[in-house]
Image (cartoon, helix red, strand yellow):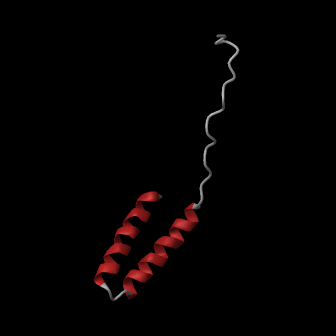
Amino acid sequence: MSTSSEIKKPGPERSRAVFSTQDFELLRAAVSEHIRHCKDPEESDKYAHLLHRLRRVS
């Protein structure tokens, strides 16, 4: 029953970024280019939404 001698567990480690700012610029450019050449309206719409989300990231 000793509360002062309890071992504190460290919190979860902070996750490292997977993509750099430069990566998002490349992804946005690639998705934009794909949208320009896409002939399927449904697919184009999905990629347009993805591009919108990528623009919000950075």
Image quadrant holding the N terminus, namely: top right
Which residue appears farthest toward the left when viewing the image? 41
The spot of residue 48 in percent (x, y) is 35, 73
- Which residue: 64% across, 42% down? 13
Rendered location of residue 49, percent (x, y): 35, 68
Q: Quadrant of residue 3?
A: top right
Q: Residue at x 34, y 79 (%)?
A: 44
Residue 17: percent from left, percent from top: 59, 55
Looking at the picture, tell me which residue is in the foreground, 42 or 50: 42
Q: Does residue 42 sit above or below 4 in this rendering?
A: below
Q: Nearer the viewer, residue 35 or 25?
A: 35
Is 11 placed above or below 26 here? above
- Looking at the image, is 15 positioned above or below residue 34? above
Residue at 61% x, 44% y is: 14
Left or right of residue 45: residue 20: right
Residue 41 as seen in the image, left or right of residue 28: left
Please give the name of the residue rendered at 60% of the width and 59% of the height, measured from the top-left corner.
18
